[in-house]
Image (cartoon, rainbow, N blue to C red):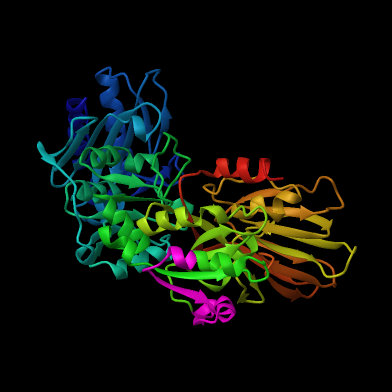
Amino acid sequence: MINILSEIAERIRAAIKLIPGPDRGKELCIGVDGTPTTYIDKTAENAVLKYLQDNDVSLNVLSEEIGFVDNGADETLVLDPIDGTTNSVIGVPLYTVSMAIGKRSLKDVHTAFIENLVTGDRYTAEKGKGAYLNGKRIQTKKRSDPDRLLMMIYLGNGAHPDSFALAKRVKTSRAYGCASIEMALVASGMADGFLMDSENNRRSIRVIDIAASYLILKEAGGEIYNLDGTEFDMPFDLELRSNFLAVGNKDVYDIVMFGSRGDKKEKRHKYGIYANMSLPAAADVAKRVMNALQGESAVFEKEIADHLGTDGCPIEQMDVDIMITVGGDGTILRAMQKNNASIFGVNAGGIGFLAEISVDKIEEGIERLRKGNYRIDKRLKLQTVFNGKKMTDAVNEAVIHTDSIAKLRQFRVYVDNHLATDLRADGVIISTPTGSTCYAMSVGSPIIDPRVNALVVVPMAAFKFAARPLVIPTSSKITVELVMDKGCLLVVDGQEEYDIPGLSKLEFSMSSDYGRFIRFDDDFYSRIHEKLDGGL
């Protein structure tokens, strides 16, 4: 198969040489993936399709411009005919043809081929046989110097603020506008890692962009992770887009995601301890946490410290990496509103859906925490803007409800300035996926997997039965208009309250910030079964 892919690349190179320079970027139509199809893209794709037809090659095709072509074959050629189209148009010598062969998803890709169409450099891989550059075997870096990281980072107009923060933190960063080359540089040991983190889903990676470089990197000894630390995979589906972190070795993941440095990781974190002091056992539990952290840099929140007669610090001023909370979900939400540290929850309250361990597992859990045996679960936050002022971000939900008992209000809900629903109700909940297992669930919201980038608008005790929850992409802006000249309350995560006068409008959208939870081995669905099915 490598020979066939090599011949296809030759056809593409010959075809695009015939295109006059000024015509390369000419837009012909909109491709199946929803992006403009340029002359060079279509020429390259047509060259591939003609080769397959002329040589009777039995492969389906999944390509950027034409979409999925079902040729009745068992396997599919996942094709990006030109990766780095803009580079090719403006004369930057970094654009490739990227091809991979598999059945359903990245995990079963078995053959990969990338060629820089300017330099002729070829990256190839076959599953279980290693990765090669121009016929010579390549490997990722086995160790990375934290003080000399070279990271490839997506820094386009959809990039998340975390990406720019990383670019400032590492020694060197580059953004080449050609994901296959950037991944290949990690595979060949020239770069330490490649971060793709876009807050605009339309700018995230597609399977065609990464199929070939995925196998090449894996065969070179690298790893690819979702941003929550789980193993990365994508089905052969042009509708889906993802963020990821590709690394030459696991140390790079730790450095990028935690700011830690390889084997020294467990000695670098600063810990904060925050407890709900209204719970009778809170002080004793907090002392157990502190004892388990002996030898680490740790500080109590001021209220606990005062109770114990020791030094402490207000939570807003705690400069810590990990905040250990003692209490229930409310304690966790208060901590997340007041501090940006990653949260490790000890459940000393009720259900504790967001907490990670119970009180009886403190010593075991803290030991795992100190050893770095965990992952970071990033969760969307909801931003609320009222009269041009940004309110406190929500991890769970923002609730707009009547400020008078047993009095209905009328609301109009707009999505991207289009009227979505007009309803009379006690209120409206705008929920994140995290909040879909909380207040929103109690009034009829579907439970949403936190990996799904969606917000939910949920009516509260609506007058009309037809007023149902709406699931809305996080790329959209939601506007809620208070139609009546009667006031409401805005409540954020059950913690912060704001008076909202009648005839007002509030705007909701995905925040540029994330909540971060420290997780061990259990998955979201195990948590639902344990905490909700078995706990209610």
Residue 306: within the magenta? yes
Which residue sits at x=21%, y=46%?
A: 187
Residue 143 picture quarter: bottom left
How far across and down, in percent of the image, does residue 66 sit? 40, 34
Q: Is residue 246 left or right of residue 11?
A: right
Q: What residue range appears in magenta? A: 289-317
Which of 302 and 521 lies nearest the eye of the viewer? 302
Residue 230: within the magenta? no
Which residue sits at x=43%, y=62%?
A: 160
Q: Is residue 351 left or right of residue 513?
A: right
How far across and down, in percent of the image, does residue 430 sit? 67, 58
Which of 57 and 267 lies nearest the eye of the viewer? 267
How far across and down, in percent of the image, does residue 273 sit? 51, 70
Residue 44 picture quarter: top left
Residue 336 visible? The answer is: no
Residue 78 visible? The answer is: yes
Q: Which quarter of the rendering shows the N terminus?
A: top left
Which of 341 and 383 lies nearest the eye of the viewer? 341
How far across and down, in percent of the image, does residue 153 sit? 31, 59
* Residue 312 position (above or below residue 123): below
Which residue sits at x=28%, y=19%?
A: 57
Q: How many marks?
A: 0
Q: Which quarter of the rendering shows the C terminus?
A: top right
* Residue 180 position (above or below residue 343): above
Which residue sits at x=10%, y=36%?
A: 135
Which of 47 and 103 lies nearest the eye of the viewer? 103
